[in-house]
Image: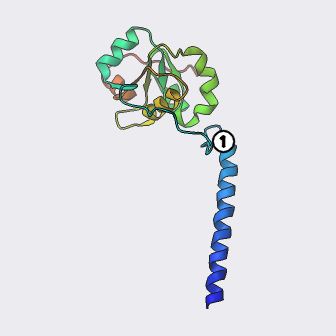
Amino acid sequence: MKDHFKKVIRQAVVILFISLFLGMGVNSFFRNGIDPFRYPAASATTATEIRKIGLEQAQQVIAGGIPILDARSQEDFSEGHIPGAISLPYYDMGSYLDRVLPFLSTNQPILIYCSEASCADAEFLARSIFQLGYAKLLVFKGGFKAWVAAGLTIEREAL
């Protein structure tokens, strides 16, 4: 019985290590993969670095001509988005980042939104690009749903 228990434990440890190495190997092939060797940033993101704003404030800053990032999927963006927005889907950020960064400045505020108030993708995207040195980030909490509900203009991708 004792030998059987040792054998089961040994097999479990082997399976654990195989799973760990396979997981890390697969993770290394994804652009948005987790970097296990990256040190955390010196200062954590705080509410003063990433501000949440409502519809009225979003309209004001958009009228001022700041860049707008849409954190929703490319499909959602194509179906309709805030005029002038640039698509940067959070879950596919690695595929789009090189095309979007030339339009952004680290010294300029950037508005980020996703589908609705309960959607966290805009905040996740804000935290990710904050780590790249963009510190003046505004997250529009109402998102696209609030924009449409207010009867504001939207743009659609030409098919």
Q: Quadrant of the N terminus?
A: bottom right
> Is residue 17 shown left or right of residue 143?
right
* Residue 42 placement (x, y as % from top left): 50, 33
Residue type beneath disc 1: Phe
Circle 1: element type: loop
Spot occupied by residue 55 in the image (x, y as percentages of width and height): 31, 21
* Quadrant of the rendered image containing residue 132: top right
Residue at the front extreme? 42
- Nearer to the camera, 155 or 138: 138
Q: Residue at x 66, y 87 (%)?
A: 3
Please say if 76 is above or below 104.
below
Residue tagged 1: 30
How far across and down, in percent of the image, does residue 53 sit?
33, 24
Outermost residue, top side: 64
Crowd rating for badge 1 (residues with CA inside 10 Å; few <14, some 14–19, many 20+) = few
- Taking the image as drawn, is residue 34 in sight? yes
- Scheme of colours in the image: rainbow
The residue under the point 62% across, 32% down is: 94
Q: Which residue shows up at 70% across the image and 43% down it?
A: 29
Count of numbered labels shown in the rendering: 1
The answer to whether residue 72 is visible is: no
For the C terminus, the image quarter is top right
Would you identify the image quadrant in which residue 117 lies?
top left
Rendered location of residue 134, percent (x, y):
50, 22
